[in-house]
Image (cartoon, grey):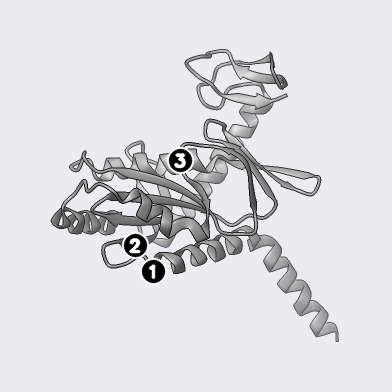
């Protein structure tokens, strides 16, 4: 009996520690399964880690290559209600009366596109199609975005809907696949460093915000009045549009 209790406790601790990673993997697996039914004209690359021009690394959940461009997919496996605006720094997850914030997945996806443009600089005519996919039980509420923010069951139809104009040849497509596969960072230590870097950046950002310093441009965050109440805005507005709740 004692052994069973200890085993259950260990399992609970493991789930508690690795829960976000497990949830993310489950969400990506669901999306990957759907992408397998897209058809032969689409090439699917999964969990790609590449370097960007500023020395940082960018981990992309899924890439779909086609003659119609590159579909850059950011996958989220969340529950609850999701509120977000494509210009905001963070989005909000509401579960009953609890609120949690997470990084704006659209901005996260654009950072992936910048990294891809750096790797594929010899192909300036490529069209990049960012898509944010929620694969869990979340309900999307008041999402303001020009970028598709969709449920996973609409992913393939969204990709096909955006596949209306070819921008690269089949030969170029094969070369692009080779370039991306060659540029991919596969070493385990590099992936660990990527996660470590993200955690450091998040911590640094929180410290700056706590001291009323803009994490985007290091300007001063000043208290302002808006139509929805008080908020903190960057002193370098309109050059910098960073805001923080009061």
Could you tell me how far apart the alpha carbons at marks 2 and 1 are, in whole angstroms? Answer: 8 Å
Query: Residue 195 at x, y = what percent?
Result: 51, 51
User: Residue 44 bears which disc, if any?
Assistant: 2
Query: Residue 145 at x, y = what percent?
Result: 51, 37
194 vs 245, nearest the viewer? 245
Q: Are marks 2 and 3 in contact (CB under 8 Å)?
A: no
Q: Are marks 2 and 1 in contact (CB under 8 Å)?
A: yes
Q: Regarding mark 1 in the picture, which secondary structure is present there?
A: loop
Q: Regarding mark 2 in the picture, which secondary structure is present there?
A: strand
The reply, left or right, for residue 155 in relation to residue 176 is right
Look at 50% across and 19% down and name the residue there: 240
Comes first in the chain, label 2 or label 1: 1
Q: Residue furthest bottom?
A: 1
Of tags 2 and 1, which is closer to the observer? 1
Q: Name the residue beneath numbered marker 1.
A: 36
Look at 51% across and 61% down and name the residue there: 153
Question: Where 108 falls versus 137 (above or below)?
Answer: above
Within 10 Å of disc 1 (Cα), the crowding (few <14, some 14-19, many 20+) is few
Comes first in the chain, label 2 or label 3: 2
Q: Name the residue beneath numbered marker 3.
A: 147
Within 10 Å of disc 2 (Cα), the crowding (few <14, some 14-19, many 20+) is some
Question: Where 57 falls versus 64 (above or below)?
Answer: above
Q: Pick the quarter of the image with the N terminus.
A: bottom right
Q: Are marks 1 and 3 in contact (CB under 8 Å)?
A: no
């Amino acid at each position: 009996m004692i052994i069973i209790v200890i085993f259950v406790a260990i399992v609970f601790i493991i789930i508690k520690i690795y829960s976000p990673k497990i949830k993310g993997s489950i969400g990506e697996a669901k999306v990957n399964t759907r992408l397998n039914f897209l058809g032969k004209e689409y090439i699917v690359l999964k969990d790609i880690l590449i370097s960007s021009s500023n020395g940082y690394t960018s981990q992309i959940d899924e890439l779909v290559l086609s003659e119609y461009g590159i579909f850059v997919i950011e996958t989220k496996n969340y529950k609850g209600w999701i509120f977000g605006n494509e210009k905001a720094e963070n989005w909000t997850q509401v579960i009953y009366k609890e609120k949690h914030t997470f990084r704006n997945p659209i901005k996260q996806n654009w950072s992936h596109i910048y990294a891809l443009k750096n790797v594929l600089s010899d192909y300036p005519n490529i069209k990049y199609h960012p898509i944010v996919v929620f694969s869990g039980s979340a309900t999307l509420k008041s999402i303001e975005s020009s970028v598709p923010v969709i449920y996973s069951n609409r992913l393939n139809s969204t990709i096909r809907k955006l596949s209306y104009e070819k921008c690269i040849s089949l030969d170029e497509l094969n070369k692009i696949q080779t370039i991306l596969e060659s540029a991919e960072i596969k070493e385990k230590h590099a992936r660990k460093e990527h996660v470590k870097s993200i955690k450091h950046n998040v911590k640094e950002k929180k410290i700056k915000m706590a001291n009323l310093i803009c994490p985007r441009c290091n300007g001063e965050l000043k208290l302002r009045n808006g139509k929805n109440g008080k908020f903190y805005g960057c002193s370098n507005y309109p050059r910098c549009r960073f805001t923080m709740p009061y």
